[in-house]
Image (tube, rainbow, N blue to C red):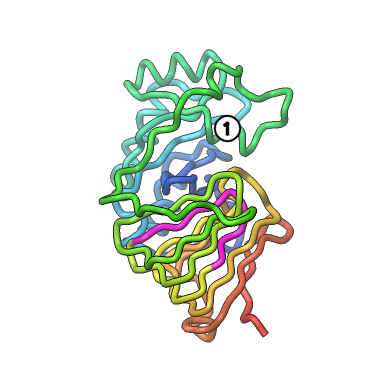
Amino acid sequence: MASRSDYEQAGELKMGQVGIANLRIRTLDVARLGEEMRERVARAPNLFARAAVVVDFGGLSQAPDATTAGALLESLRQAGVIPVALAYGTREIDALAQSLGLPLLAKFRAQYESAEREPPPAARAAPEPTAPVASVAPVAPATGVSLMHTAPVRSGQQVYAQGRDLVVAAGVGAGAEVIADGSVHVYGALRGRALAGAQGDEKARIFCREFHAELVAIAGRYRVIEEVPRELRGKAVQVWLEADSLHLAELG
């Protein structure tokens, strides 16, 4: 099956703060959206198979009808992911969510919409559901403007630096997740997931001493290990966002 990664996709997939993916619908083509999602799951099944997905219809001129939306949800399920909610939007989206039996999440829309179109304060203040993890690793007190974490981050653990950079003075194991609203610095092997700019900071970066990451993301734009040049694996690497595209390069 030919990949659509080289041209504009019908749905833009971004990774959220806790690993929940946001699927921004650009073109309401149920078959094409299902095909794109199957390709993503096939490329990185350990990351996307049975992944929780929030469906965002905010990129369309009007909300789809319940029949079309239901067909899309079923197509995504058949592709291997699990739609868990709709992104907050208009009253029509609210009614659609109710008819589909899904909740609304407000957090993801803030990454796309301008200030004058943000959801009401009450909606923005609603807590965002978190993805299940085996445990949350204890963190050391913040040092300066960064959160310093000195122990290895093991599989199933998650460390989050809210409103600051995260410095991990050890390794990040496969299946672990390190997240920061600022940049992420890993002074060991990065084998799990690293998400920088979790609240939308496009200037955030990821640095690691030994790159084996399952997934890296900045402000929601992501790459999985299968999409990373082999010559960078095991090297000291930095990741940054430029022109809305994620870049990786060896640290010189």
The kind of residue on which mark 1 rests is: Arg
SS under mark 1: helix
| Vertical arrangement, residue 145 with respect to residue 57, above or below | below
- Residue marked by disc 1: 109
Q: Magenta-highlighted stretch: main secondary structure?
A: strand
| Vertical arrangement, residue 122 with respect to residue 209, above or below | above
Q: Residue furthest left?
A: 134
Indicate whether residue 143 is drawn in magenta: no
Q: Position of residue 18 (x, y in %)?
A: 43, 46
Residue at 41 percent across and 57 percent down: it is 177
Indicate whether residue 179 is drawn in magenta: yes
Residue at 38 percent across and 16 percent down: it is 98
Q: Position of residue 117 (x, y in %)?
A: 69, 24
Residue at 53 percent across and 78 percent down: it is 209
Q: Looking at the image, how many numbered discs can be counted on the residues?
A: 1
In the image, is 144 to the left or to the right of 57?
right
Quadrant containing the N terminus is: bottom left
Q: Position of residue 67 (x, y in %)?
A: 38, 24
Q: Position of residue 176 (x, y in %)?
A: 36, 60
Q: Is residue 4 visible?
A: no
Residue nearest the viewer, comparing 83 with 70: 83
Quadrant containing the C terminus is: bottom right
Residue at 39 percent across and 36 percent down: it is 72
Q: Is residue 57 visible?
A: yes
Residue nearest the viewer, comparing 245 with 142: 142
Residue 90, by quadrant, is: top right
Read off the magenta span. 176-185
Residue 185, by quadrant, is: bottom right
Mark 1 is surrounded, within 10 Å at the Cα level, by few (under 14), some (14 to 19) or many (20 or more) other residues, namely many
